Image (tube, rainbow, N blue to C red):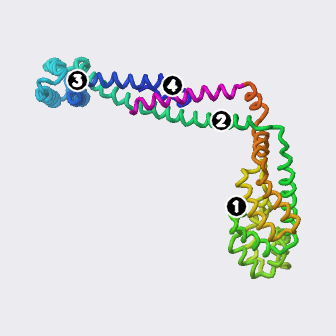
Amino acid sequence: MAGTVPAADVTVDDLAAARERLRQAEAAVDDYGESEARRVAEAYEDATDLLTNYEDTATGSGDFAAYVEFQERFVNLVEELPDDLPTRESFEEANDLLDRRRLAKKHFDRARDLLAPAREAVEALDEREAARGHLRETRQAVRRRLSTLEEEIRYRERLLDLGAADLDAPTERLRDPIETYNSAVTDGFERFRREESARDLLDLVATTTAYPLVEFTPPPESLRAYLDDAPLGSEPLPTLLEYVGYSRSKLDHYVDDPDRFRTHVATHETYLTRLDATPLTVGWPPPEAGELRRDAEELVAVVARFADESVVSHARRVRDLALRDDYERLRQSAVARDELAEKERDRLASGAVEAELADLRAERDRLRSALDDGES
């Protein structure tokens, strides 16, 4: 059986060749007839099994009983074959050869040669099965190639969309308000984290579960329960993290129950350390207008819970960016600047991307048509 065709290299010609191989293999079996080919193959397998099993014991001056048994079994096998079985004469010739007083290994070898016509039926069946498998694998390779082509086509279509953007558009009209808000909300959250109690901080984070677009990881319930009860919960988070680094003997001077503190606070050190304003910021390039508006509505609601009015005002300005008539044009320019490297810009300018896209679409259409023709 031929090796599997790599999906990256598969062509219409490979598919046609696989189908032709199967057509020829099926024709070879049809020359016998399906049932006849299988009967010949079964008889051939029985005969060669006898030759293999008795070659050592029924030859030379070996086991006479094995010699007699072998001849009887081989004669019976041939006599029970249907008169109209294709290649029956090859079994008869092998039987005549083996009908002698003494057998040697060369007679067994010669008998196998005489059974060659029957072996061709076995090979025809095997080749048909192999051809079916090869065609199946080639079709799978075509489907994988089509999947890859779709990805490459989408990529180049996106490049063309980005290439149509106005790269000279004043994207600072979006960037400046977003950067101002991000800086303000980061400072505001860090101030809250540094100055307010850890209990209040985790309560704030917990309330954001009502705002799924603000993607804070909810605080562990055991940690919140501990801070709600322990006097230590009134301390700001940096103080708690400082305590985490203390030895047990030193911690004993600051915490009523050091073991409980370690169980409920120290085990969550990674979570507490990573708790920052990132979920409250807006990325760059910004999302589409509808998404930005929905995100910013929730940001305004959350920021108002801990920051002063100036930060909330910056959040509202970010929300209102989505209402600008030129938002999508400016955003598309920002996306293009962010994603298009100099190499892609050169390829767009030269027309290479359009040419590649045409070639990929043509290959996709050829493969689709060839695949559909064989499956209809």
Q: Which image quarter is the C terminus in? A: top left
Q: Is residue 212 visible?
A: yes
Tag in front: 1 or 3: 1
> Which three-letter amino acid code belongs to the residue tagged 4?
Thr
Q: CA distance from mark 4 to mark 2?
A: 23 Å
> Mark 4 or mark 1, which is nearer the start of the sequence?
4
Disc number placed over residue 32 in the picture, else none: 3
Amino acid residing under circle 2: Glu
Give the extent of the magenta segment.
351-376
Residue 359 lies in the magenta stretch? yes
Give the side of residue 302 with respect to residue 360, left or right: right
244 and 313: which one is in front? Answer: 313
Q: Earlier in the sequence, mark 4 or mark 3?
A: 4
Q: Is residue 57 in sight in this rendering?
A: no
Tag in front: 4 or 2 = 2
Do the residues bearing badges 3 and 2 touch, measured as CB atoms within 8 Å? no
Seen at 53% across and 34% down, the residue is 146
* Residue wearing tag 2: 157
Label 4 belongs to which residue? 11
On the rendered structure, is 127 left or right of 14? left
Q: Which label sits in the foreground, 1 or 4?
A: 1
Furthest toward the front, the residue is 325
Q: x%, y% of residue 61? A: 19, 23
Q: Which residue is mark 1?
A: 213
Q: Residue at x 14, y 18 (%)?
A: 96
Kindly identify the residue that appears in the image at 80 percent across and 62 percent down.
Answer: 276
Q: Position of residue 82 (x, y in %)?
A: 12, 27
The kind of residue tagged 1 is: Leu
Looking at the picture, tell me which residue is in the foreground, 268 or 114: 268
Quick check: 327 above or below 357?
Answer: below
Location of residue 348 by image quarter: top right
Task: Decide: few, some or many residues near mark 1? Use Cα within 10 Å; few <14, some 14-19, many ≥20.
Answer: some
